[in-house]
Image: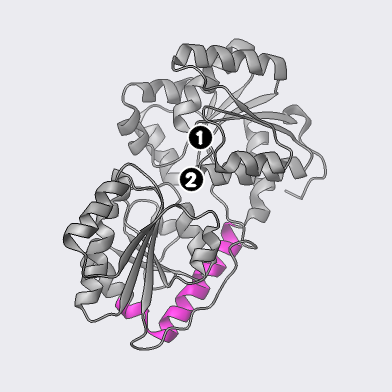
Amino acid sequence: MENRNTPIKKYNKIAFVAGTLGRGGAERQLYYIAGSLVKHGYDISVYCLTKNEFYQSKLEETGIPVIYFGEEQSKLKRVSKLIKLLRSDRPQLIYSFHFYTNTYAGIAGKMLTIPVIGSIRSDAISEKRLNGKMAWFHYSLPDFIVANSEHGAFNCKRIFYKKKIFVLGNVIDTDLFEFVSKDIHPGSRLNLILVGRFEKEKQPWLFPELIKELSDAGVDVKGQMIGEGSFKEETTQLLSRQYSNYNISVYDAHPEIHEVYKNAHWLCSLSRYEGTPNVVMEAMASGVGIASFDYTGIHKLIENDSTGVLGNNIKGLSSGIIKNSEPASYKKMTLNARNKIVNDYSLKFLVNRFEELLMKIGA
């Protein structure tokens, strides 16, 4: 599809519904989509259950209004508030950007006879596990479901039931996340980072074990853990109890994470499952090596020893990092990874791909 100068009239006015606008991967993708659509003439608004978070100000800077509807604890009152707001705004399409806001958007859409897109942001398996019986409402009430990965879409059909499911993959701003070549010399210190939420599915407690494995193998290594989450305090205490002899630090979420990537050699992804991890894509674009567990879906991004390192356990990742930290291997691998992101996941493709989605749901 060629670049368009005007929006698709049928869906010119779009209301996004979000649960949070914090520094998360889904929230960054919402910012990318909403901002890109506004530049192409779309009328965009965002309705959110929380307020005064990181991406609210970012969205408002682009002229996108962010409307809070989470004053009440009662879900019924929240739905009622959202319906009232949307009735006044009269969008042509409602797009719920978090799985747990699909029900809010779905009910509002049915009451106002407005089509609704719901989201799967991970692998569908985790959504069902985390939301219990409510997962069926979150999946059923929207007219369409959009996953950010093919394996998430596949799992939806396997776990729930078949309905119209589309894939809109994550993208990266390759101008912001620019490639920075890192010189690695034999015996030089390796800087490893873990970026993201300190939550159970991310398994942050395994990062210090990786640092220990590398250090015990004679590697001069430094570890940085960056983010927020319910397991952060527990992880910090673990470091104090068991890993105080190793060079590992914990930091709050960084507002300009692209600056962190400039000094990192390896980003570690130790999750049990993911959709299409934003931090992995950002690091690949920035010239950072990727060391990831071999979970479903990561193969779309990482080919072992070509665009990153895959392993089934800590020892496997440690061996892969040591092997691919040889200067020639590291340079080739990080260049391959950058090219992968530029060619397949660049922000420049977003509007065209989104409009292809709009054409499909409008068919």
User: Could you classify mark 2 by the number of other residues whose Cα lies within 10 Å: few (under 14), some (14-19), or many (20 or more)?
Assistant: some
Identify the image quadrant of residue 184: bottom left
Magenta highlight range: 322-345
Residue at numbered disc 1: 20
Three-letter residue code for mark 1: Thr
Residue nearest the observer in this picture, 301 or 96: 96
* Tag 2 near tag 1, CB within 8 Å: yes
Disc number for residue 189:
none
Q: List x then y, in percent, for residue 273.
A: 34, 47
Tell me: 34 left or right of 107: right
User: Could you classify mark 1 by the number of other residues whose Cα lies within 10 Å: few (under 14), some (14-19), or many (20 or more)?
Assistant: many
Q: List x then y, in percent, for residue 109.
A: 59, 17
Residue at numbered disc 2: 24
Tell me: 196 left or right of 86: left
Q: List x then y, in percent, for residue 78.
A: 51, 16
Identify the image quadrant of residue 316: bottom left
Q: Residue at x 79, y 39 (%)?
A: 41
Q: List x then y, in percent, for residue 310.
A: 33, 65
Question: Is any atom of residue 355 visible in this view?
Answer: no
Q: Residue at x 40, y 34 (%)?
A: 156
Prevailing SS of the magenta stretch: helix
Residue nearest the observer in this picture, 266 or 251: 251
Q: Residue at x 45, y 21 (%)?
A: 140
Disc 1, SS: loop
Identify the image quadrant of residue 219: bottom left
